[in-house]
Amino acid sequence: MSTAAVASPSRSGRLGLADRLRELVRPEFATDVIVPQPDDPVLGTPVCAVPACGRSSSLHGWCQAHYRRWDRDGRPERQAWAALADPTAVGHRPLAVCRARGCRFGQHRDQLCYQHSQAWRRQGQPAIADWLDDLPPAVVDDTPVCAVAGCDLLVEWGEPGLCAPHRTRWRGRGRPELTEYLFWCATYGEPRFDLRDLTAQVRLEIQYVLQCRADERRTRTTPRSIRPVLRYLAEQQTRSLLDHSAEFWIAQVRGGSTTTTRAFLRYAIDILTELRDGNGWDSEYAADVWRLARLGLRVSRRAQFDFRPIRPAWLRGLVKRWLRWRIANEFALTQIRKDFTALTRLATLTPGLSAAPTSLNRAAIERYLARLSTVVTHAKTRSGDISVVAAFLRAVHLHRWAALPADALIHADDHPRHDLNPAPRALPEPVMAQLESETNLARLTDPRIRLLVEILIGTGLRIGDATRLTIDCLVRDPQGAPYLHYRNHKMRRDAMVPIDEHLAVAIGDQQQRIRARYPNATVLFPRDTTNPDGRLPLPAATFTVNLKRWLADCNITDELGRPARVTAHRFRHTYACRLINSEVSQEVVRRLLDHTSHTMTAHYARLADSTIRDQWQRAQKINIRGEPVDLPDDGPLADAAWMKQNLARAKMALPNGYCGLPLQKSCPHANACLTCPLFITTADFLPQHQQQLADTRRLIAQAETDGRERMVQMNRTVEANLLTIITTLQPGQTCTCGPSGCAKDGEHDAR
């Protein structure tokens, strides 16, 4: 709507509705007959399918004249017929000129102008061809050309600037004012809003409503679609549309049951009521039903908050005051809707509140919590409701909006217990492999949906942020690397995320498609309907519907062969988990996801332990006897075993392996860990084992030389264990000599 259409209550009250309408309706709409341009995206209709016709289509894509010709020819193939059809139509073809040479007057009769016709008749009507040949050429003087646009015939005498044919038509229409007749000639055959038979007040109202429709540029409203409304209002000589509700008019108007007609009547009543009563907080706050669009919120005109179920009156007043405060502080509309729902539940689940705020005490809150647990069974949803009530009560206490009891509070332990470590929401890689398959992606015939899927996978954006990307969202740094610039609507700030070149090229292709279709487009993914300029984004719900259809068409299944549950937000979890499991630091992941704190990012980062554990389990682990060491695969025992191994790696790491002894135990072995039955090692430490074997053999040789038998005996055990470990960790190698037969210079087959 234009800014001129917004009225304050005081000004509206001083001038009255009719005066305000006269003040606001612009000249192009302040006419009895409104003829929209054929290319008008709101009030007009697409041009005729015949090239060069240029007139508005009215039936099956044809103008009235070409529809009649096409129907008369037996309705042949459309494109072929349109290519050969004469683009001119009755009322727009050049008028016939007098047959006399040099004469530029229009034909009157006998295919001659009035003067030549009279002369021919006075001469006895000889053979007209011979008569015209003998006639000297007419002399062209300074007689003006006809006033009708496109007509090059000369004006006849005694008439208001019209040629003879147009003078005849002018007389047939009752000799209207010349400007009115010229307008009728210029728009002959075009669809029009004819308001001449309406009362003066209703005419102003319809003019204003059509003007608002055109200014909003959302919903198409053609003359044909509201013709039943105009006809009924003219027949009944209605004084004002505001005499009755929209539902009354819908029931009375014959043909008013169509979707377009119903929408127009509801819109008309709403826009006129807003003009009469004003908008903004001054007019809406006291009402029991808030029309959210009148508060400046970008929502549907039918969106509202109905406070009537909230009782008693003092609680309703507090809820309205708190919601006004939340809206003024620019909380997200999604959250405000949740606030309203939660507080409505508070009122309905807390019966027995008296006329004083003191009745909302701790006992009443406990009754509310008990009833809420039976009405809202999902713990997370219930916890969200309780959080809203807690914030509401804190605000009432803080701002002293009412004298609530001191114990009217929500405590931390009032929230339901729920899983503090929920299952990861990232999509399994087998499912992602199906989703990223080029064959499956090719089945997304809508390029907008396919690009959205690729953006969600490649950037982790929320679906609301992705659908509202601007047309110029692609940015490159000085080195030419591409980035995606987007608005983080949840945090209310701009952000950027790096993307690969493949995704950048796909976004560039989408930009070209949109600019070709909508030269003035502002969004990358415009919606299909009620969007003539391409400035409104694709609804997230539309993407969800297309995603579900695609999943069913491609038969995307999980590891068990069941239909995979895929949502737009799970792509975000998958993106984050892939980064974490690729050893990207948590701080980098936080910045890529544009999280405010590490708390949410940690929800993804905890999965990195699972990746490390998988790598640990895939590695070959043996003890000092060369026997494999297996950990449980799943369940609480597996988690406990993994935690023990992780702690050992962190706090008891050895230069050549890990200690498998619980941290609560002290080591009973005074010798090296190679003689300990709890020692565990892998092939990662093979070079250290080989070096230690060489060092051990040198110790044995020195001890034998010195005659220290105990030292030789202890190191023989270490040597044997090392040989077993090295042999086991080197597939295909076998030790061909015992400890006593090994070369003492460190040479060994196991090397």
Image (tube, rainbow, N blue to C red):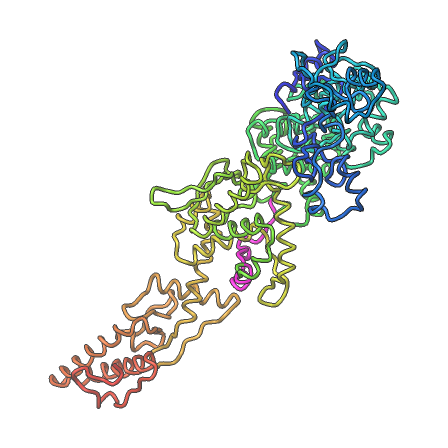
Q: Please name whichever residue, 471 or 416, is drawn nearer the observer in this view of the structure.
A: 471
In the image, residue 359 lies at what x, y percent? 70, 30
Q: Please name whichever residue, 509 or 176, is drawn nearer the observer in this view of the structure.
A: 176
Tell whether position 15 is magenta.
no
In the image, residue 473 lies at what x, y percent? 47, 40
In the image, residue 53 lies at what x, y percent? 68, 34
Q: Is residue 22 above or below residue 292?
A: above
**Residue 230 quadrant:** top right
**Range of the magenta residues?**
415-435
**Residue 356 quadrant:** top right
**Quadrant of the frame with the N terminus:** top right
Q: Main secondary structure of the magenta part?
A: loop
Say which residue appears at 60% left-offset and 50% top-offset: 446
Say which residue appears at 48% left-offset and 47% top-offset: 600
Whether residue 271 appears in this view of the structure is no
**Residue 111 quadrant:** top right
Q: Is residue 422 above or below residue 409?
A: below
Q: Is residue 652 above or below residue 316?
A: below
In the image, residue 414 lies at what x, y percent? 60, 43
Q: Please name whichever residue, 465 or 403, is drawn nearer the observer in this view of the structure.
A: 465
Left or right of 732 on screen, residue 97: right
Left or right of 194 on screen, residue 695: left
**Quadrant of the frame with the C terminus:** bottom left
Say which residue appears at 62% left-offset and 22% top-offset: 2
* Residue furthest left in the image: 706
Whether residue 437 appears in this view of the structure is yes
Tell whether position 417 is magenta.
yes
